[in-house]
Each structure stands twice: as C-alpha cells, then as structure tokens.
C-alpha cells in the first residue's frame, strides 16, 4: 500500500492542509475537535509533515501520533531551502502546506518520524527554553543599567538573583 502525504502549515489558530494528490488546500481550526474529525478521514498509511513552530504544532502532532499516523516534524530552514531549490517563490500558507507535502513525499525515506517526548523530556525542554529566556533577560538588564551609577548596586543585586535562578534551573 502506498503512502499518502500531507503537508500542514501550522499557525496559532489555523492549520492549512495540503496533499500531493490535489491542488486545493483545506483550512482547519487548530483545536482538538477539528483535528480529530479530520484525522478520521485520512486513509491508512498517511504521513503528515509540519514545521516545528514552538508549541502550535504540538496538538496536531500528538493527536495524529495517537491515531497511528506517521508524523515528520521539520525544520523551517530546511523547507525554505527546499522551496528555493525547486523554484517555489510564493510564500503563502497554502503554498507552504503544498511544499511541505511535496518535501515529505520526496524525502521521507531520509527523515526520522517524530515520537512524542515523555514527561521528563518535556520538562527538560521547558526548563531549557525558560533558561534561555532568563539569560537573555539578564543581558538586557545588565546592559540597560550599565552606565547608571545611581542604580549600580541595585542592578548588580538583581543580576545576582537572576544568576541564582539560572543556577537553580541548571
């Protein structure tokens, strides 16, 4: 049985869905009921590709994986370069969904299917993201008070507290 490939351009509120078998796309709300309803319509051996979007892709990925569908979580940079390589210049949600479907249809043999993280991996991922945010904030705080002698001691204390937080996260 041959695979059917679906490309999904994920946004906060919507999913733009394309398959390599049709030129039209489908727009769904990015919520459980709409996604579950759509997943039930997919044929066996369907494969879904989507770009990693921070967190907006997570619901679709988890529901599709639970339904037994192969998921490919893709780096946006790779899709961008692929689109340029095949001469696609348009940058719309339907075009993005179609290029993702085309990419996984042609490259799925080289890709690793996505597997959900366990609760410890999710916690670690969240901690790493929070740490990065705190480190950026520390740099901004330090730079903004750098030339202000009047608040020097207070800003130094604040940076020390932030350093303590970073240490605890680590």
Image (cartoon, helix red, strand yellow):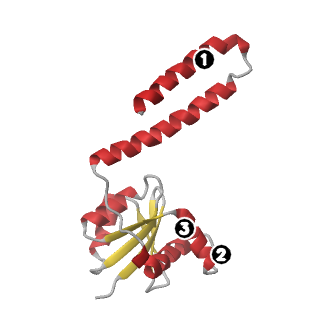
Q: Tell me the tag on residue 29.
A: none
Crowd class of label 3 (few under 14; some 14 to 19; many from 20; radius 10 Å): few
Crowd class of label 1 (few under 14; some 14 to 19; many from 20; radius 10 Å): some
Residue under label 3, please give it: 78
Determine whether, in the image, residue 14 is placed left or right of residue 68: right
Q: For the point 52% across and 38% down, which residue is it?
A: 133
Determine whether, in the image, residue 24 is placed left or right of residue 85: left
Q: For the point 43% across and 86% down, which residue is it?
A: 21
Residue under label 1, please give it: 156
Disc 1 from disc 3: Cα separation: 42 Å
Of the image marks 3 and 2, the number of the one nearer the N terminus? 3
Figure quadrant of residue 139:
top right
Q: Tell me the tag on residue 89.
A: 2
Of the image marks 1 and 3, the number of the one nearer the N terminus? 3
Which quarter of the figure is the N terminus placed in?
A: bottom left
Crowd class of label 2 (few under 14; some 14 to 19; many from 20; radius 10 Å): few
């Amino acid at each position: 049985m041959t695979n059917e490939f679906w490309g999904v351009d994920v946004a906060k509120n919507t999913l733009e869905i394309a398959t390599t078998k049709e030129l039209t796309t489908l727009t769904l709300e990015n919520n459980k009921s709409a996604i579950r309803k759509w997943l039930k319509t997919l044929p066996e051996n369907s494969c879904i590709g989507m770009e990693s979007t921070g967190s907006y892709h997570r619901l679709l990925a988890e529901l599709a994986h639970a339904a037994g569908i192969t998921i490919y979580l893709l780096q946006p940079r790779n899709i961008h370069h692929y689109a340029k390589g095949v001469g696609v210049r348009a940058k719309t949600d339907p075009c993005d969904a179609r290029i993702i479907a085309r990419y996984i249809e042609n490259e799925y043999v080289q890709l690793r299917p996505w597997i959900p993280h366990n609760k410890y991996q999710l916690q670690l991922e969240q901690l790493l993201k929070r740490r990065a945010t705190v480190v950026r904030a520390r740099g901004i705080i330090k730079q903004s008070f750098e030339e202000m002698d009047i608040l020097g001691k207070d800003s130094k204390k604040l940076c020390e507290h932030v350093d303590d937080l970073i240490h605890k996260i680590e």
